[in-house]
Amino acid sequence: MLFSSLLGLICVRETFPKSYNMWYLCAVFPAGAGGWAPVESNKYQWLEVDLGERTEITAVATQGRYGSSDWVSSFLLMFSDTGCNWKQYRQEDNIRAFTGNSNADSVVQFKLQQPVFARFLRLLPLDWNPNGRIGLRLEAYGCPYKSDVARFDGSSCLLYRFSPNPTSSQTAKDTISLKFKTLQNSGTLIHTEGQDDHTITLELHKGKLLLHLRKGTVASITSILLLDDQHWHHVAIERFSGHLNFTVDKSSQQIQVPAELSPSEINKISYGGVQCHGSQRVMSRRNFHGCLENLLWNDVNVIDLAKQQQQVFITGNVTFTCAEPVSVPVTFAGAQSFLQLPGAAQQQRDGGGVAFRTWNRAGLLLTFDLQQQAGSLWLYLSEARVRLQIHKAGRYTILVDVTAGFGLNDGQWHSVDLTARRGHLTITVDKEEDSTAHASPSFPVVSGNNLFFGGCPDSENNQECRNPFNVFQGCMRHIHVDNNAVDLIKVQQMLIGNYSDLQIDMCGIIDRCSPSHCEHGGRCTQSWSTFHCNCSNTGYSGATCHSSVYEKSCEAYKHQGNTSGLYYIDVDGSGPIKSQLIYCNMTDKTWLVIQHNNTELTKLKASSGINQHLAYFNYSADAEQLWAIITQAEHCEQEVLYHCRKSLLLNTPDGSPFTWWVGRTDEPQTYWGGAVPGSQQCGCGLQGNCIDSDHYCNCDNLPVRWVVVGDLQRPGSEAAYKVGPLKCHGDKNFWNAAFFNKETSYLHFPTFHGELSADISFLFKTTAASGVFLENLGIKDFIRVELSSPTEVVFSFDVGNGPFEVRVETGDVALNDDRWHRVRAERNVKEASLRVDAFPNATQKAPADGHIHLQLNSQLFVGGTASRMKGFLGCIRSLQLNGRTLDLEERAKITPGVRPGCPGHCSSYGELCQNQGRCVEMYNGFSCDCGLSAYAGPFCQREVSADFKPGTSVQYTFKEPYELNRNISTQSSSIYSDLKLRGENVSFSFRSSQSPALLLYVSSYYREYLAVLLNRNGYLDVKYKLQNSRDAEVFRTSVRNLANGQLHRVSIRRLSETVSVQVIYSLTVQGIYYVTVQSGELDPEIARLNSQGFSGCLSVVQFNSVAPLKAALLYPNTSPVIVIGSLVESTCGSSSPANPYPAETIHSLSDHLGTVGTGELIVNAIKSDSALIGGVIAVVIFVILCALAIMARFLYRRKETFHTQEPQGIKPEADSPEYPFHSEPNSQNILSENQKEYFI
């Protein structure tokens, strides 16, 4: 408590420059007293200082009591203008406690981050020397403060009119600023009017400020909440160059202002209401009720003019002092908080009431026992509604249960009135009839000796107060018992009642959602002690919705094993650019395809009065997203096709083109592709004058945003254009890597700025047991990620609360296995998290009352450290900080001990190559060689299938050895090597409703063969004849009819005399059969089945290392296949639903593969003999009337065709959509391929 009579002179002084007009306050104590020391050392003591007038306080200093063991080790600071309604000072808006002294002699000074303007200062000790008492010497620093104030009573206002020629007001920058304080939650502060119905209105609405800009319609900006707390709040509105800055206390927002709202159009400003204008357009029904301070319009002091009665008109009762109403709130801050008050002395009691504000949805407001032990009454919050229950004494029987109000956890003040009179019980919320509930108990509702607010005493002997509900956390005021107001100052002085863990004469509620720490549109909700971010439908995750849940490129999706389809791409990760749904075409190169609103061929004809045609293209991504995608990609291109007849493109009389296009820079572009189709270059590439010499096109202007087509006014003129989608491949950031070959080597980058949110992600591979991945230091703060052991990664940092660590242990899985491992670390104001690969996420909560700003000032070290810790040996790749990728390769080029790039990706990604696909190393990444696989696609996972009908046949024939030797090559030797067979591995999938049918036939030149067929019952038969002198051996399965139109898979493996057959019925494994054979005649049956033909589907046919069907479908011109009839690839063999977006852009065979080869009928082929190779089987593989073809791995070619080209000699149909104009007889204007113009 404050004992002013004990104050005497004891000071700790410091010298300041004469130019700094400061004062210092010395606490004054009698000689020998040595400082302030209360009689009792407990948490209810404080030291209060009256500075005499409002003052700007900038710093405080503390010292222990002289010559003693008494000092304060932590304390709170509070300020007030009147000595009532105190406000607590918080560092970083979060930390309430200041660290004090550790001895009696040293001085600890705190410079306040934001100065405080107040007359009264109060210090509340929290902790002190446990071996001594509370002891303190205090000094405060600051500057004089001058202000002009005006008080408005809710019906008054000031009107400031500009002079007829307000030259001083017509400035390039306009500023309105003021301070206000009020207990009312609504009212108009400022209303401006200008010409043409232009208005700006600033109003307080339910405790928050709304700024309205109006001309016909209203555009509004919302500020922070809880501004009706009877404390000063600063507001500034600035308009400059079409922008408006709106600042409330420390929170600022900026918006674009319509051009018509220019500063010169404002000619009068009303303060306190809108009635001064005589206007009927009232944004709020209430005028302002409270105090305004320092009303400034472009440095014009409006209150000073009002005092002098110059240019300011006063309406109503405006006084130039701030007389504040007395309102004493009390804060219930913790689980032990309660307030106990005596019941009223009268026997007949009318009831009472209380006002409260909170963020919590539940909590006890009031409880008491009824007289004569009739029961207990509870008034509490439940689901943000007020609920009253009366339970019968000794039982849980509910006698009364009523509810009233809703949404009462909004932080606003709400009143609850309880009235019990003559058998009628009423509760009313906010004095509104719609929020009133009634009950008619059969007994009198009269309180006992004590009433308990907020909670109950924590005592085993307490029989008078029981709380089966949550404790209340929030503020209360206007407490009435039997309609008599309770003097809470007397409660504070221990004169009446009892309490615990309360802050009396202050409301400590904090708005943790204004400004919101939830990023990327996350919705902020809060309770008394914390806030929560709802990240639903934002595309981001984490405690503050900081980290994107999507990948940054199609390349990243591909290397997770994904196939073509639509994916959300977030090009900057946790940065401000929103994610976008984009199609990824996962071919050998991963293409990102961005569509626009018109990718079809558009025809134009001459029209009178129209000289130009403008075509605008709206892309599925916005401009910021597009530029980020183009910047990140290795290559981007866009196709433009232009046809014309009597419509000039470039050949204009004055040299200026009739037709041009506009790209990203919004400037007309007159250059075109300038290169022949297929060269994959633009004109600048052929001429060697591209902006970037490493590229063959100027892609800085992509995408094409609009096209202007001219010369359409002449009779008979026609034109047609087509602008394709923007296509990009590659991700420069995904493979950006550096190799650190010395522990002392490192890369350095500018300081990492992640004050409130910081995320770090990268991939690494190493054989070392430990090392620091990255580190950035500040004066005291730091952030670091390191490999502490082969099985542990540590993320550590310090934001001023001491070192903080998050660890992920991988158990038996070693991280130094020279494989790529991914690390993601994030730190925000709520928590820190660390994730390594797919191991469980490790999370540590941040202190509820601590520093939140990470303040770094040194360079960022990557691969090493400035703190002499062990550096990293190995590779770091794709390092991203807050969504921005650091260019490791570029920095590594100029750094000793570090090499750009890092090979060896197959050890980590090789498992993505499926179905016998082979991983091939590349400088940036890897590829899958599917040459030995029956599958295709980027990961050898796409089934190669075809539908067959009678009349279709394919023959594949191995060449004889002497033919190979005549023209030996790497490709041919790879195709025909390894022909000395000791057994067979045969697998294929099929779908058919035909039985009997021959599925597979393998024949040697000695009439030895293998045949797989369906018999007349649809069962699978496998027939072998390995020696010409022996009969065929037959294995039959009779488990299920396979001719049922469903997809089945068959695998046959022979080693010497043993054959195993595995049948997967409808893609469900049924069993593996080992063959003991019986004899039978073969040739007549094979011939009969051959004559019937085959109808059905065959897919992924594999014979040892040969994939015949794949070769026939994809590479017929380079494989020894003969195809008769129509053979087209289909998805009939796919085991999953067809993707609506194909994995590859499929063109007709005539487009890319040439004419399909022809040969003899398959019937005749069966009857012919094959050549003998070294006494072993040389095979001819047949599928009767269906296709089996082969291609070896080195003939597998990647698709790299970027523009579809029409084959020479084939004319499109005149009415085809791709043919822009109808031909006329003997017309000489038919377009040829040379008339097409391409640009990239």
Image (cartoon, rainbow, N blue to C red):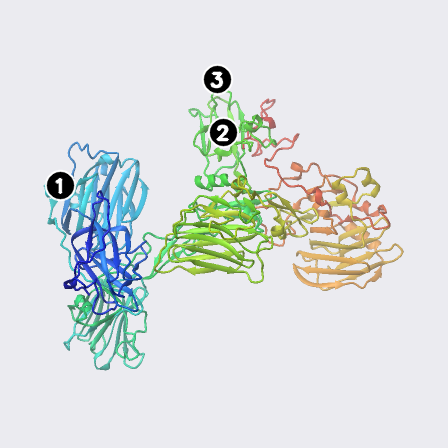
* Residue 26 falls in image quadrant: bottom left
Q: Quadrant of the C terminus?
A: top right
Q: Which residue is mark 1?
A: 305
Q: Type of residue at label 3?
A: Pro
What element does badge 1 sit on? helix
Q: Position of residue 907 (x, y in %)?
A: 62, 51
Mark in front: 2 vs 1: 1
Q: Which residue is mark 2?
A: 604
Is residue 1064 visible in this depiction of the protein? yes
Mark in front: 3 vs 2: 3
Question: Who comes first in sequence, dot 2 or dot 1?
Answer: 1
Q: Which residue is mark 3?
A: 653
Q: Nearer the viewer, residue 863 or 591?
A: 863
Picture layout, residue 690 above or below residue 339 = above
Say left or right for 526 vs 1014.
left
Few, some or many residues within 10 Å of mark 2 (<14, 14–19, 20+): some
Q: How many marks?
A: 3
Q: Position of residue 92 (x, y in %)?
A: 32, 53
